[in-house]
Image: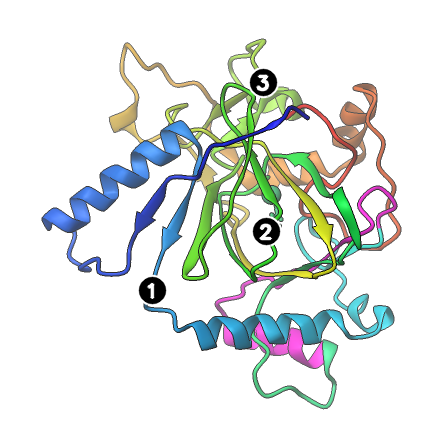
Amino acid sequence: MGPVAELKLPVIDLSSLGLEPGTAEWTAARDGVKRALESYGCFEARFEKVPAEMQASMLGLVREVFDLPLQTKLRNVSSKPLHGYVGQYPMVPLYESIGIEDADVYERVDGLTTTLWPEGHPSFRLRVMKYAAPRTTDDQIGLAPHTDKIFLTILCQNDVHGLQVQTKHGEWFSARPSPNSFTVMIGDSLYLSLKFLPSLLETIDENFSYLAWVNGSLHSPCHQVMISGNEVRYLAVLFSIPKGGYIIKAPNELVDEEHPLLFKPFDHMEFLQFFYSEAGQSTESARGEHRSRVNQGQPWTDPGPAQPC
Ligand SMILES: O=C(O)CCC(=O)C(=O)O
Ligand SMILES: [Fe+2]
């Protein structure tokens, strides 16, 4: 890891944004989002309409979830990549997360609530993540460098910072969102790693990654989490994952002679299944990486040791 540069995430204020596409305000915000995603692949979305108390009570619930016994958290098992309980990795011992499939469908979230609290819970409705406090003054690895194997990530964190993002030029810098902000980041569902899925691609390039859905015009950032101090980092996170059967393909408007189609259209679930399959994992082992799994679910991100993204 290189030194953390004095860079900041671009900040886009969405608080007073009118909902009407086409208004000057909406157009300015859209252009800001586009520029941020092209340059950094992520941005800080300021949104003051979420009351601080709501955010605090939500993160309080996140804490309640992780305070449950490990055996209870392990009940949230899934054979699908990016779902279930993830944690207890020797390589990232501070890290735990609990995924909820279809988090926008009441019955699904209710199902998880019953799994965790058979007697019921009045207000748990989230997908959540925790990094234990390392109780050190120097940085400990919270999550190794990776790109997200999904479509879009929206992070809502407490005031314990830790996320670091790598620029296209290889410099690392800290994301330190304000309390009213969310961190928005794009993932590999758009930005497909050729190294993991050569068979689905028409073109193989020695550069690893391209953005599939927008035909290479955006940037999916490498990021990691480094933690120090005595406070626990809690997050509620929205991971947006295309459903199986949906084909990721660059829209025709983005393809022309100057910008030929970079990717064969692909099914994202197929990509994920490959990434977490024996073959996908051995592609990683072949590159000298090591991973140990102690839970029955599959990790939905790549919490292995430090690796080039
Ligand atoms: O803790 C964070 O801020 C980032 C988490 C992350 O990168 C991930 O879950 O993929
Ligand atoms: Fe990530």
Is 92 a magenta residue? yes
Q: Is residue 18 above or below residue 57?
A: above
Q: Nearer the viewer, residue 262 or 12?
A: 12
Q: Is residue 237 above or below residue 224?
A: below
Residue type at numbered disc 3:
Phe
Image point 18% across, 49% down: which residue? Answer: 26
Residue position marked by numbered label 1 in the rendering: 48
Rounded to the nearest angstrom, the CA distance separating label 1 from label 3 is 38 Å
Q: Is residue 300 left or right of residue 217?
A: right
Q: Is residue 203 left or right of residue 98?
A: left
Magenta-highlighted residues: 89-115
Secondary structure of the residue carrying numbered label 2? loop
Q: Is residue 129 above or below residue 215?
A: below
- Toward the front, the furthest residue is 137
Residue 135 sits in quarter: bottom right
Instruction: Quadrant for the N terminus, please.
Output: top right
Which of the two labelled residues, at mark 3 and mark 2, occupies the earlier sequence position? Answer: 2
Residue 254 sits in quarter: top left
Q: Nearer the viewer, residue 105 or 199?
A: 105
Whereabouts is ligand 2, in terms of quadrant?
top right
Secondary structure of the residue carrying numbered label 1? loop
Image coordinates for residue 84, horizontal then vertical, percent: 71, 59
Is 63 a magenta residue? no
Q: Is residue 38 left or right of residue 31?
A: right
- Disc 1 crowd, CA 10 A, few/some/many (<14, 14-19, 20+): some
Residue type at numbered disc 1:
Glu
Residue position marked by numbered label 2 in the rendering: 161
Residue type at numbered disc 2:
His
Rounded to the nearest angstrom, the CA distance separating label 3 from label 2 is 29 Å
Image coordinates for residue 51, horizontal then vertical, percent: 39, 73
- Toward the left, the furthest residue is 23
